[in-house]
Amino acid sequence: MDVLSPALENAAGDTQSRPRYGVILLPQNLTLPIPLEETRPTELEIGFGNGEYTVKYARAHPETMIFGVEVSPACVLRCARRAAGLDNLKILRADARLMMRELFGEGALDRVTMNFPCPWPKRRHAHRRVTARDFADSLAVVLKRGGVFELVTDDEPYALEAKERLGAHPALTLNRFEINPVRPVTTKYERKWLAEGKNICRLTFIRTGDIPAPARRAWGLSQEESFPMHIRTERPATLGLLESLNGVSGQDGEARWAFGRCYVSPGEDALLLEVFSVDDEFEQRYYIRVSGRGGGGLVQMDRTANAFLTPSVRGALRDVASRLSPQEAQA
Ligand SMILES: C[S@@+](CC[C@H](N)C(=O)[O-])C[C@H]1O[C@@H](n2cnc3c(N)ncnc32)[C@H](O)[C@@H]1O
């Protein structure tokens, strides 16, 4: 599902009427890291689900700029509907595990909140937990010194794992571990579970120390430097060549991509190739545009691409380009 942007809606509708959606940030319009107003507290909520908590929280804190990152496009739309008219909440579709550090610069955030993350209890799914791998590193990078991370969960093993992993990080200190805290804003599941007599754990960490060198280098997805990323090729593409890529896939480490159907533009001056890209289970679907230029070709992200330039997206662009250039394609 594609995500509507308020700009698209306004272009089609009456600008005087009440907006039907809140602010959705689209990858192709973003400068990374996202520039922030230094005078305003800035917070992030990870995995906001239907956005009920997020929108109530944003209404209760008009002085704070709140960002919401959610991996499910359907949830982004649901939250955007609730957030109509709110100007201190910006939401976007991304995988927080991989993108938090790309989206926000060093020491950018005063607070990060995560309510009821998916616990992924099976061992083979453990890598999907938001707190897995280098999450503690990313958190330490994006939080200001004194900044807070609040994790609320109904899953005690998850709470204990987070306590151990995040608490062991040299820049983070566990400040509180509470059972059934009273929170001014609550989520639907929280109310249901509390009513059923289930325990809720809240862990509060503070960034207290210096940031050690993170284990994983940031991708550095600066869109300014690279968007629209384009690669010149020696030959233009033919429909036959791009159609023959349907079902072909590629891989570079954890970055994987697969090509799908090909479409011809109405003016027949460009071809659009459907691509599915995956970076450590973060899936993006978009189109690569291939056009002819002075005997050569131009391979680039289509303007409607709505994808971050993650390693798999760059890999797919280079893959297409290399098929049109006998020598190695140059970015
Ligand atoms: C159990 S739901 C909780 C939703 C909401 N926070 C609440 O309390 O009602 C977990 C949410 O986290 C989202 N999610 C899971 N992994 C994520 C990730 N890596 N980055 C961002 N969101 C993620 C899921 O799509 C889902 O909406």
Image (spheres, grey):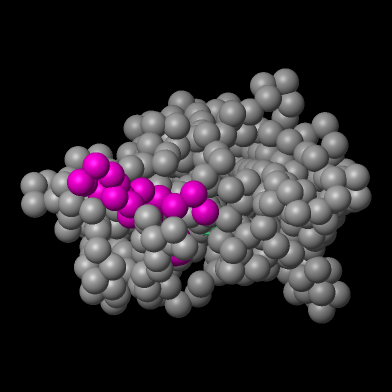
Instruction: Give coordinates of residue 283: x percent, y percent.
Output: 44, 64
Image quadrant where residue 219 sits: top left
- Farthest residue, direction right: 17
Instruction: Specify start and end residues of the magenta stretch as a single range.
Output: 283-304
Given residues 83 and 254, the one toward you in this image is 83
Image quadrant where residue 80 sits: bottom right
Please state if 71 lies on the left or on the right of 83 as rendered: left
State whether residue 277 appears in this view.
no
Instruction: Give coordinates of residue 233: x percent, y percent.
Output: 20, 46
Residue sitting at x 78%, y 39%: 88
Compared to residue 300, the image places residue 61 above or below, namely above
- Residue 246 magenta: no
Ligand 1 image position (quadrant) = bottom right
Please state if 293 lies on the left or on the right of 154 as rendered: left
Image quadrant where residue 231 sits: top left
Residue sitting at x 16%, y 47%: 234
Compared to residue 80, the image places residue 89 above or below, namely above
State whether residue 196 appears in this view.
yes
Residue sitting at x 74%, y 59%: 79
Instruction: Give coordinates of residue 39: x percent, y percent.
Output: 72, 20
Given residues 152 and 310, the one toward you in this image is 310
Residue sitting at x 90%, y 45%: 16
Compared to residue 120, the image places residue 134 above or below, namely above
Instruction: Give coordinates of residue 290: x percent, y percent.
Output: 33, 54
Q: Main secondary structure of the magenta part?
A: strand
- Farthest residue, direction left: 327
